[in-house]
Each structure stands twice: as C-alpha cells, then as structure tokens.
Image: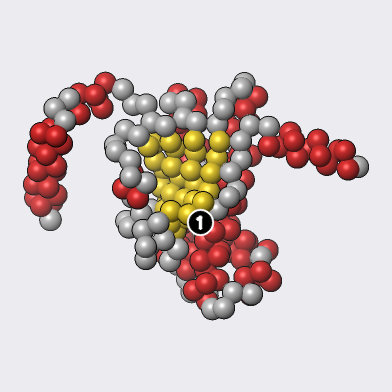
Amino acid sequence: MLNDILARNVAWSQQRHAEEPDYFTRLAALQAPEFFWIGCSDSRVPANVVAGLDPGEVFVHRNVANIVHSSDMNLLSALEFAVDALHVREIIVCGHYGCGGVKAATEDLPHGLADHWLEPIRRLARAYSVDLGREPDLEAQRDRLAELNVVEGVRRVCETPILQRAWRRGANVRVHGLIYGLRDGRLRDLDCSIGPGHFQAAQSTQEAVQ
C-alpha cells in the first residue's frame, strides 16, 4: 500500500511539472492562501478537491465532525496563524451530510473518547429537539443537525479572541458556513456569514430596543 502511494506521488509530481514547470518552485517560495477551511476529517471531503482549489490556495484544519471547541489548541493555533500570519480574509466552516460524527452523537452507544469530543453536538440536539422533531426521519434529523453544527461553529469562531482582535484592528475577515452533499458533490451556503461589525451592530440594536 505504501509503495502504491509513493508511485502515485511520482506520477502526480511528474504530471504537475509537465503541465506547469514552475509549479513546485512557486509553491515552495510562498504560502499565500485566500481561505482557511475548518472541515470534517472524513476522507470523502478533502477541502481543496471539493472546493475546486489547488494546493496553496486553502489553509486547512480538520477534525471529527468539524467541531469548533473553544479549548481546542490545535484549531485555535491554526486559526491564529491563518488570520495573523497568512492574513486570510475568508474563513469557511464546512460540514457534510451523512456525517459519521453527527451520527455517533445521536446514538445511545459508547464511542470512547469520541463521546467527549462530540458533546457539543449532543447539546445542540437537545437545544433544537423541537425543530429536529419536525424532520421526516432520522437521516433528515441528522442532516439538519449537521447544518446546525456548522452554524454554531461559525458563531464560535467569531467569538474567539483571535477574530475579535482582528476585527478591532480593522482586518476584513469574514466567516462562512457551508455544507457538502456526499450524494451530489455540491457545496451549499447555509447563509450564516459573519463579518466585521456584526457583534457591534447586534449590540447597538439591542441597546436601542432597551
């Protein structure tokens, strides 16, 4: 299996070099991606492939069920590097339908350490139990929960001190939520994008109402 991977790598490298002789030289010289992608570890959802992007165009963090934990130092370090060092301007939280992590979070079965990791999804399921109950079947409920997990992830990214500091210094960073369909290969916008001034505007509106 390893030899097969190495052989595929050689074939890919040779093909890329033939198509664009300076491809690897250009990539080695500078990393300047436009996007930071927070996605699921599922092998069927590779960020640059489903988004139609080349290596070098997207900086990626992936974990089980694309969960944004406020204590996840791995994710926060990648986020900070993306915003402060790479100066990305578009952050994408992307989930997918048929997510195994979401499925595990809705099962009454032991999953080891994954049960601790998936707790935020179980909290979402409890918070939106009435809405989820309106879905026609269990699969539809899980797909809707996958969408809610993305929306929650967008909000939690925006609440990090990293984004709050970036916005205060005038960085034009926006955070978006997408969901990927395994059956049709399409990305869908969940219409939950947040950009600079969002929280200030919401706070001003609340103060005006009061």
Q: Is residue 158 visible?
A: yes
| Residue 184 image offset from top left, x and y in percent | 37, 62
Hey, which quadrant is residue 147 in on the image?
bottom right
Examine the rendered structure and indicate whether residue 151 appears above or below residue 80.
Answer: below
Q: Position of residue 50 (x, y in %)?
A: 35, 50
The residue carrying mark 1 is 117
* Above or below 30: residue 174: below
The amino acid at mark 1 is Trp
Answer whether residue 74 is visible to the viewer in this image. no
Residue sticking out furthest to the right: 210
Quarter of the picture containing the N terminus is bottom left
Pick whichever, 34 or 37, lies toward us: 34
> What residue appears at the point 55 percent right and 40 percent down from the top-left corner?
175
| Picture quadrant of residue 30 | top left
Above/below status of 127 relative to 17: below
Q: How is the image coloured?
A: secondary structure
Q: In which quadrant is the C terminus drawn?
A: top right
Q: Position of residue 76 (x, y in %)?
A: 51, 37
Could you tell me which residue is drawn at 41 percent across and 61 percent down?
181
Q: Element under label 1?
A: helix
Number of residues whose C-alpha sits closer than 10 Å to that of mark 1, classed few (under 14), some (14–19) or many (20 or more): some
Q: Is residue 31 left or right of residue 103?
A: left
The x, y position of residue 191, in whole percent, is: 58, 50
Residue at x 29%, y 37% (from the top left corner) = 55
Nearest the eye: 91 or 64: 91
Q: In this image, 192 relative to 92: left or right?
A: right
